[in-house]
Image (cartoon, grey):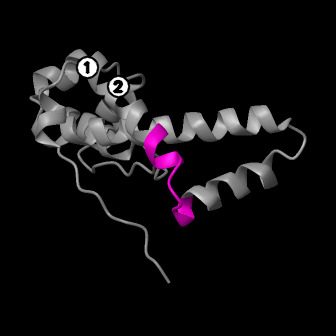
Amino acid sequence: MWLLYLLPRKAQFAVGRALGSFVRHLPFSYVRIARSNIGLCFPELPDAQRKELLKRQFHSIGIAICETANTWWASDRYIASVTDVVGREHIEAALAKGRGAIMVGGHFTTIEIATRILGSLSPLNVLPASRK
């Protein structure tokens, strides 16, 4: 992961897409499940479009691995240089009231980098959803 962090951003994305493509062709259950879910969610799409969605999903997963490396090792300055936070004023206004703020987000492939970005704006604690 540290070696991924050392690569330029464009190279990270290329490696991430290649990694995702590689994993997509392995006989892992989550590849089969992703393929099945896309078929169930988008039965009207031609097979070629469903395959493209699957390909893009695994590219995203591979890129998320590279973003995770940046989350762990990149400086706040670097993180700020590659992001644009829209709605920052809402966080700042909520925190100005002195009571904190609760932000809710989905667990998408961008969760690691999104948490790092938000953590660079203000102190942050992450609470996982409970599993029952």
Q: Is residue 29 above or below residue 57?
A: below
Residue for badge 2: 13
Residue 59 % position (x, y): 48, 35
Outermost residue toward the right in this view: 44
- Quadrant location of the N terminus? top left
Residue for badge 1: 9
Count of number-bearing discs? 2
Q: Nearer the viewer, residue 41 or 4?
A: 4
Please state the extent of the stretch shown in magenta in the rendering. Answer: 21-30
Residue 26 belongs to the span the image colors magenta = yes
Label 2: how many Cα within 10 Å (few below 14, some 14–19, many 20+): many
Asked if residue 95 can be seen in this view, the reply is no
Amino acid at dot 2: Phe
The residue depicted at 74 percent of the width and 39 percent of the height is 50
Q: Nearer the viewer, residue 13 or 121?
A: 13
Q: Is residue 74 above or below residue 43?
A: above
Alpha carbon distance from label 2 to label 1: 6 Å
The residue depicted at 28 percent of the width and 57 percent of the height is 126
Residue 125 % position (x, y): 23, 56
Label 1: how many Cα within 10 Å (few below 14, some 14–19, many 20+): some
Residue 65 % position (x, y): 31, 42
Residue contact between numbered discs 2 and 1, judged by CB atoms under 8 Å: yes
Quadrant assignment, res 3: top left
The residue depicted at 63 percent of the width and 60 percent of the height is 32
Q: Secondary structure at mark 2?
A: helix
Residue 67 belongs to the span the image colors magenta = no
Tell whether 126 sits left or right of 72.
right
Main SS, magenta residues: helix
Q: Secondary structure at mark 1?
A: helix
Amino acid at dot 1: Arg
